[in-house]
Image (cartoon, rainbow, N blue to C red):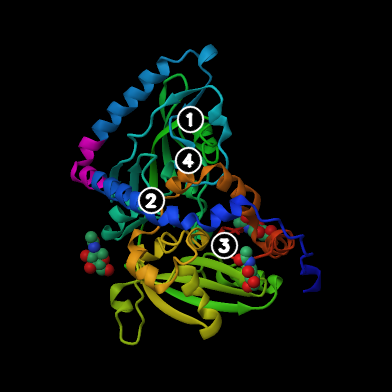
Amino acid sequence: MSDLEAPLRPKRKKGIADFLVQFRWILVVFVVLPISVTIYFLIYLGDVKSDMKSYKKRQKEHDENVKKVVKRLKERNPSKDGLVCTARKPWIAVGMRNVDYKRARHFEVDLSAFRNILDIDKDRMIAKVEPLVNMGQISRATCPMNLSLAVVAELDDLTVGGLINGYGIEGSSHIYGLFSDTVVAYEIVLADGQVVRATKDNEYKDLFYAIPWSQGTLGLLVSAEIKLIPIKEYMKLTYKPVASNLREIAQAYADSFAPRDGDQDNQAKVPDFVEGMIYTSTEAVFMTGRYASKEEAKKKGNVINSVGWWFKPWFYQHAATALKRGEFTEYIPTREYYHRHTRSLYWEGKLILPFGDQFWFRFLFGWMMPPKVSLLKATQGEAIRNYYHQNHVIQDMLVPLYKVGDALEWQHREVEVNMSFSAPAFNYSFSF
Ligand SMILES: *[C@@H]1O[C@H](CO)[C@@H](O)[C@H](O)[C@H]1NC(C)=O
Ligand SMILES: *[C@@H]1O[C@H](CO)[C@@H](O)[C@H](O)[C@H]1NC(C)=O
Ligand SMILES: *[C@@H]1O[C@H](CO)[C@@H](O)[C@H](O)[C@H]1NC(C)=O
């Protein structure tokens, strides 16, 4: 381990920003949370209203909205108006990076109406959705039908458009790939106003393969058809602690879902879900999940843990209890499992509200969590924003599975491993 000891960094001088960060909770508790709750409630009402419309009606409204986008694009003078951008304000996105390109001259197209589920086709096992549909909305619609997207990103607010134009990965990606790998068709409005449907084998197949991770540079995504899979009501989750060095932790992680004999197709050897959390450079917990029926979950002796209740311990802290109590297994309602990190925003919640994980806070105010990331960003001000940019790392990395050990050691040397998160894609692993 000695080569891993990080050199001591000089202590930073405390400034006004530290002070602001320390007392940020006042703004969060009294302003951000109440507004968040109101917004969530209004959005929920909007979704309920949309749910009451037939799929046919929603498709009709969709077609009208697409026509509006086309009309708007025809108004653009390419030599004068600059690049096409969505009118979405940068602070609304869940991502933390600076979005400076929207400060330059650009031609805004408003896509805010594209927030509906257009169809759930149980025969084709396809969900057709608009880009602003988010994960919470889609799992609320599909889980009661015993269906789900194959890759459900955990935070409720993550949108289909973001997961396609950026990328999305989850604990089921070792089976299904990235979020975009589960999409079978994109409906795109090109800059000249042409509306095309791109699939992997039609005349727009180049576009189909180019859209994922293109950050919206190729056209405006207005709907996507995404594969559904059958699911069961519960996730049987086993928490396994590992106390060792980072190399061994990386090996244990690989062993938790990738059979050493390479027999990836053997369902008995490969779990439906896998996730790892590394708490310090010597402590990690790996979780593997399998879908389970209600009958199985309710059998005598099994523990059912509804982690979705507002007063429940934050998930990463609950998982950490395996370090003390040893390996354990429990059954979690599937939808609550999908969104296990929503309430605490992984472990970011602890930085925003240092006492948010305490029992009294969870019990009294937990139902208001999480603060909307977009509101946090909108209210943080320049000083706090710069503080986070200088002192706080949120880094997604995709590395090949056999490189995870190297990546963890490198990460530990550079910024100290504290709280990594990982979900594997086939042969690739995502961490930190
Ligand atoms: C979902 O599956 C359960 C049994 O596993 C069944 O009781 C229930 O009716 C199913 N729901 C739908 C909408 O098919
Ligand atoms: C990282 O982990 C160490 C050991 O558990 C802890 O002392 C330290 O406070 C943590 N650092 C941060 C930034 O959480
Ligand atoms: C996974 O990675 C291993 C090691 O690099 C390689 O031999 C294997 O072919 C890869 N499998 C796939 C499906 O890419």
Give me the residue at 57% from left, 58% from top. Answer: 426
Which residue corresponds to mark 2? 31
* The one of 381 and 394 positioned closer to us in this rendering: 381
Which residue corresponds to mark 4? 91
Spot the residue most to the bottom. Answer: 301
> Image quadrant of ligand 2?
bottom right
Q: Amino acid at mark 2?
A: Val
Q: Amino acid at mark 3?
A: Ser
Give me the residue at 51% from left, 66% from top. Answer: 274
- Where is residue 269 drawn, in percent x and y? 52, 72
Residue 8 in sight here: yes
CA–CA distance in space, label 3 to label 2? 33 Å
Tell me if label 1 and label 3 are in contact, CB under 8 Å. Answer: no
Give me the residue at 55% from left, 41% from top. Answer: 213
CA–CA distance in space, label 4 to label 1? 33 Å
Which residue corresponds to mark 3? 422
Label 3 vs label 2, nearer the camera: 2
Look at the magenta stretch and give its main secondary structure.
helix
Specify the quadrant of the image occupied by residue 92.
top left
Task: Please tell me how crowded label 4 is: few (under 14), some (14-19), or many (20+) other residues with Cα within 10 Å.
Answer: some
Q: Amino acid at mark 4?
A: Trp
Q: Mark 1 vs mark 3: which is more N-terminal? A: 1
Q: Which secondary structure lies at badge 4?
A: helix
- Where is residue 242 drawn, in percent x and y? 61, 78
CA–CA distance in space, label 4 to label 2? 17 Å
Tell me if label 2 and label 1 are in contact, CB under 8 Å. Answer: no
